[in-house]
Image (cartoon, rainbow, N blue to C red):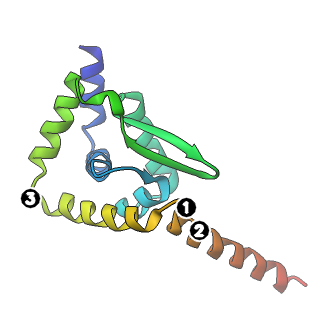
Amino acid sequence: MDRTLTSIKALSDKQRIRIVAALSGGELCLCSLQEILGLSPSTVSRHVSILKHAGLVASRTEGKWRYFNLAKDLENTPEGGLVRWLLQSLENNAQADEDKISARKLRESQEWRCSFCVAVNDRSKKKRSGKENKGK
Protein backbone atom coordinates (compact mmCIF):
# COMPACT_ATOMS: atom_id res chain seq x y z
CA MET A 1 0.00 0.00 0.00
CA ASP A 2 2.89 2.38 0.73
CA ARG A 3 4.20 2.17 -2.84
CA THR A 4 0.75 2.93 -4.24
CA LEU A 5 0.38 5.90 -1.90
CA THR A 6 3.82 7.18 -2.94
CA SER A 7 2.74 6.89 -6.60
CA ILE A 8 -0.49 8.77 -5.94
CA LYS A 9 1.45 11.54 -4.22
CA ALA A 10 3.95 11.66 -7.09
CA LEU A 11 1.10 12.08 -9.56
CA SER A 12 -0.57 14.83 -7.54
CA ASP A 13 1.24 17.55 -9.48
CA LYS A 14 0.28 18.87 -12.93
CA GLN A 15 3.88 18.98 -14.20
CA ARG A 16 4.56 15.40 -13.14
CA ILE A 17 1.35 14.27 -14.84
CA ARG A 18 2.56 16.05 -17.98
CA ILE A 19 5.92 14.25 -17.72
CA VAL A 20 4.22 10.85 -17.45
CA ALA A 21 2.00 11.67 -20.43
CA ALA A 22 5.00 12.82 -22.50
CA LEU A 23 6.95 9.67 -21.60
CA SER A 24 4.01 7.42 -22.47
CA GLY A 25 5.11 7.67 -26.10
CA GLY A 26 8.70 6.68 -25.37
CA GLU A 27 12.02 7.92 -24.09
CA LEU A 28 12.92 11.61 -23.84
CA CYS A 29 15.98 13.45 -22.63
CA LEU A 30 15.90 15.97 -19.80
CA CYS A 31 16.10 18.99 -22.07
CA SER A 32 13.22 17.72 -24.23
CA LEU A 33 11.10 17.49 -21.08
CA GLN A 34 12.32 20.96 -20.19
CA GLU A 35 11.21 22.29 -23.57
CA ILE A 36 7.78 20.62 -23.34
CA LEU A 37 7.10 21.88 -19.82
CA GLY A 38 8.74 25.29 -20.18
CA LEU A 39 10.57 24.80 -16.87
CA SER A 40 14.19 25.10 -15.78
CA PRO A 41 16.45 22.02 -15.81
CA SER A 42 16.58 21.90 -12.01
CA THR A 43 12.79 22.03 -11.70
CA VAL A 44 12.33 19.26 -14.28
CA SER A 45 15.02 17.19 -12.53
CA ARG A 46 13.21 17.59 -9.21
CA HIS A 47 9.90 16.44 -10.71
CA VAL A 48 11.56 13.48 -12.46
CA SER A 49 13.33 12.55 -9.23
CA ILE A 50 9.99 12.34 -7.42
CA LEU A 51 8.59 10.13 -10.19
CA LYS A 52 11.71 7.94 -10.08
CA HIS A 53 11.45 7.59 -6.29
CA ALA A 54 7.85 6.43 -6.76
CA GLY A 55 9.05 3.80 -9.26
CA LEU A 56 7.12 5.34 -12.16
CA VAL A 57 10.07 6.59 -14.21
CA ALA A 58 13.46 5.08 -15.04
CA SER A 59 16.53 6.77 -16.52
CA ARG A 60 19.73 6.06 -18.34
CA THR A 61 22.79 8.17 -19.06
CA GLU A 62 24.56 8.35 -22.38
CA GLY A 63 27.53 10.69 -22.38
CA LYS A 64 26.33 14.05 -21.10
CA TRP A 65 22.69 13.27 -21.75
CA ARG A 66 20.12 11.71 -19.43
CA TYR A 67 17.15 9.93 -20.94
CA PHE A 68 13.91 9.07 -19.15
CA ASN A 69 11.10 6.63 -19.80
CA LEU A 70 8.25 5.03 -17.93
CA ALA A 71 9.54 2.23 -15.71
CA LYS A 72 9.59 -1.08 -17.58
CA ASP A 73 8.24 -3.20 -14.72
CA LEU A 74 5.29 -0.86 -14.24
CA GLU A 75 2.76 -2.69 -16.42
CA ASN A 76 1.83 -5.50 -14.05
CA THR A 77 1.66 -3.47 -10.84
CA PRO A 78 -1.10 -1.51 -9.12
CA GLU A 79 0.91 1.63 -9.90
CA GLY A 80 0.85 0.68 -13.58
CA GLY A 81 -2.92 0.49 -13.37
CA LEU A 82 -2.90 3.97 -11.88
CA VAL A 83 -0.77 5.28 -14.75
CA ARG A 84 -3.03 3.57 -17.33
CA TRP A 85 -6.08 5.15 -15.71
CA LEU A 86 -4.35 8.54 -15.69
CA LEU A 87 -3.40 8.32 -19.37
CA GLN A 88 -6.92 7.20 -20.33
CA SER A 89 -8.41 10.11 -18.39
CA LEU A 90 -6.16 12.50 -20.33
CA GLU A 91 -7.46 11.38 -23.73
CA ASN A 92 -8.81 14.40 -25.61
CA ASN A 93 -7.25 16.78 -23.08
CA ALA A 94 -5.90 19.78 -25.00
CA GLN A 95 -2.75 20.22 -22.88
CA ALA A 96 -1.93 16.50 -22.90
CA ASP A 97 -2.52 16.28 -26.65
CA GLU A 98 -0.25 19.28 -27.27
CA ASP A 99 2.46 17.78 -25.02
CA LYS A 100 2.24 14.43 -26.82
CA ILE A 101 2.66 16.12 -30.21
CA SER A 102 5.66 18.11 -28.93
CA ALA A 103 7.14 14.97 -27.37
CA ARG A 104 6.73 13.01 -30.60
CA LYS A 105 8.46 15.76 -32.63
CA LEU A 106 11.30 16.05 -30.13
CA ARG A 107 11.67 12.27 -29.99
CA GLU A 108 11.93 12.11 -33.79
CA SER A 109 14.61 14.82 -33.88
CA GLN A 110 16.45 13.46 -30.84
CA GLU A 111 17.91 10.35 -32.51
CA TRP A 112 21.24 9.44 -30.86
CA ARG A 113 22.06 12.91 -29.63
CA CYS A 114 19.56 15.41 -28.41
CA SER A 115 19.45 18.21 -30.97
CA PHE A 116 17.97 20.62 -28.45
CA CYS A 117 20.86 19.90 -26.02
CA VAL A 118 23.37 20.43 -28.79
CA ALA A 119 21.73 23.72 -29.79
CA VAL A 120 21.65 24.96 -26.19
CA ASN A 121 25.28 23.93 -25.64
CA ASP A 122 26.33 25.65 -28.88
CA ARG A 123 24.55 28.88 -27.85
CA SER A 124 26.23 28.72 -24.42
CA LYS A 125 29.66 28.22 -26.00
CA LYS A 126 29.09 31.16 -28.37
CA LYS A 127 28.03 33.40 -25.47
CA ARG A 128 31.09 32.38 -23.43
CA SER A 129 33.47 32.85 -26.36
CA GLY A 130 31.87 36.21 -27.13
CA LYS A 131 32.45 37.35 -23.56
CA GLU A 132 36.03 36.07 -23.66
CA ASN A 133 36.72 37.87 -26.95
CA LYS A 134 35.33 41.15 -25.60
CA GLY A 135 37.80 41.01 -22.74
CA LYS A 136 40.79 40.72 -25.13
First in sequence: mark 3 vs mark 2: 3
- Is 59 in front, or is 126? 59
Q: Is residue 51 above or below residue 4?
A: below
Q: x%, y% of residue 27?
A: 39, 50
| Quadrant position of the C terminus in the picture | bottom right
Q: Amino acid at mark 2?
A: Val
Q: Check contact, mark 3 vs mark 2: CB within 8 A.
A: no
Furthest-right residue in this view: 136
Which residue is labeled 1 in the image?
113
Give the secondary structure at mark 3. Answer: loop
Q: Is residue 7 left or right of residue 111?
A: left
Which residue is labeled 3 in the image?
92
Label 3 to label 2: alpha-carbon separation? 33 Å
What is the crowding at mark 1: few (fewer than 14 residues within 10 Å), some, or many (at least 20)? some
Foreground mark, 3 or 1?
1
First in sequence: mark 3 vs mark 1: 3
Q: Check contact, mark 3 vs mark 1: CB within 8 A.
A: no
Q: Amino acid at mark 1?
A: Arg
What is the crowding at mark 2: few (fewer than 14 residues within 10 Å), some, or many (at least 20)? few
Q: Check contact, mark 1 vs mark 2: CB within 8 A.
A: yes
Give the secondary structure at mark 2. Answer: helix
Give the secondary structure at mark 1. Answer: loop
Which numbered disc covers residue 35? Answer: none
**In percent of the image, x 23 and y 23: which residue is there?**
77
Q: Is residue 14 above or below residue 92?
A: above
Residue 3 location, quadrant: top left
Asked whether the viewer can see residue 117, the reply is yes
Q: Is residue 16 above or below residue 31?
A: above
Q: Is residue 58 left or right of residue 127?
A: left
Which residue is labeled 2 in the image?
118
Label 1 to label 2: alpha-carbon separation? 8 Å
